[in-house]
Amino acid sequence: MRIALLTPYFAPDVYSGIAQYIEDLALQLANNGHDVEVFSICYKSRCAYEERNGFKVFWVLNSKTLWSKRMPFLGVVRMSFKTRSLLKKRHVFKPFDIVEYPNDGVIGLAALLLKLPCPLPKFVNRLSSPKAVYIKLRNYYRFTEYIEGLQARLSDAIIGNTQANLDICRQAYGFSSDLAHCVILHGLSVESESVVEPCVLNNDNKLSVFFLGRMEDRKGFDLLVKSWPMVVSAVPNARLIAAGEDMPYREGQSFYNWVVSEADSKVFDSIEYLGSISFEEREMNFQCCDICVIPSRYESFCITALEAMRHSKPVVCFDVGGISEVVSHDVSGLLVPQESCEQLAESLITLLKNKEKRVLLGNNAYHELLSKFTLSQMLSKTEDFYYSLILPR
């Protein structure tokens, strides 16, 4: 198959769940003999084309304008049309069988509206978190929500990363249940898919809780900070290690600085904020922590949970979106009612005080990763769904 993967985010410009998923899928498809081309928005100066691990990457320059800053949805639409122009050239050169894109960024919308020359590929919308669920909507986001829905309704097929998120997106976007669809869980690479690694614990006298996520409203770091005084009161040697890009927020402040300004200053004696970190630093922190905490207000799937599971670490998170299809309560982690800071603290305290339970849940998490969330499983199900769309019945 010849496959185009469109994305608003791709490494090294942006590290995110969507960027990681696209890179993993492109590599797996290419390794399995498919002709794969990735089309991504470029946020930094670089060449327009590069070869990467068996697949091609085409960069679409994000040239910001004054009006796109004032009306972000116009910038989003503009990038979709720029991507469609490049996609058309590559399709004329050699037709694609499949064009896949996420709902975030509506990067496939222009190609759906203006079409591509025949033979037409099948357009596949793989769903991540819909903005309608987690953003306190302003007017321009309401339009973004509308065009996300339009992109989904015009697509030939829909892939949900969890059943819960598929159902939520169907309600938010209004696409028909008759539209070809399936659920394919994300996968993660593991060194061995048959041998369970031992759980690695900290050797110092501190018990470490690791948070990884952008500093923004959806990721819920402010909820974690509200719960943290209860944690350190019960477990004085607990420390919180936080990492992730700090995003603009209110009154000229970044999100992290806003959280700091609203919280008790004493709590930050046990919190270390690392800012944006590299992949190697991420892996080191997953390896060294005792617990991974994910206090998100919404997650369609949550690859961060898989990263913790890969290192045999238990996960504590709010039971939102598709989380319960990734983390099994009291098996691979603990699920907490949405935005309940008190119960989030209680769950963290329970695991911090009980080493045996941490080890048990952590090793269960690794087993669960191997049984449900490997790249080989994701690749096989994706190929099967692609073939079902393009082969005659």
Image (tube, rainbow, N blue to C red):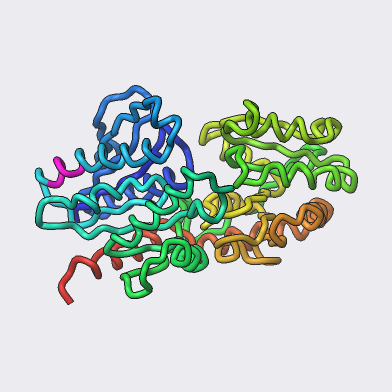
Residue extending farthest to the top is 45
Q: Nearer the viewer, residue 359 or 77?
A: 77
Q: Residue at x 62, y 35 (%)?
A: 243
Percent coordinates x, y for residue 298 in the rendering? 59, 54
User: Is residue 280 magenta-colored?
Assistant: no
Q: Quadrant of the C terminus?
A: bottom left
Within the image, what quadrant is residue 159 found in? bottom left
Q: Residue at x 84, y 34 (%)?
A: 264
Q: Residue at x 54, y 53 (%)?
A: 302
The residues colored magenta run 87-91
- The answer to whether residue 385 is above or below residue 178 is above
Percent coordinates x, y for residue 151 in the rendering? 33, 55
Q: Nearer the viewer, residue 305 or 362?
A: 305
Q: Residue at x 46, y 65 (%)?
A: 166
- Magenta: main secondary structure equals helix
- The answer to whether residue 294 is above or below residue 364 is above
Q: Does the rendering let one see residue 305?
A: yes
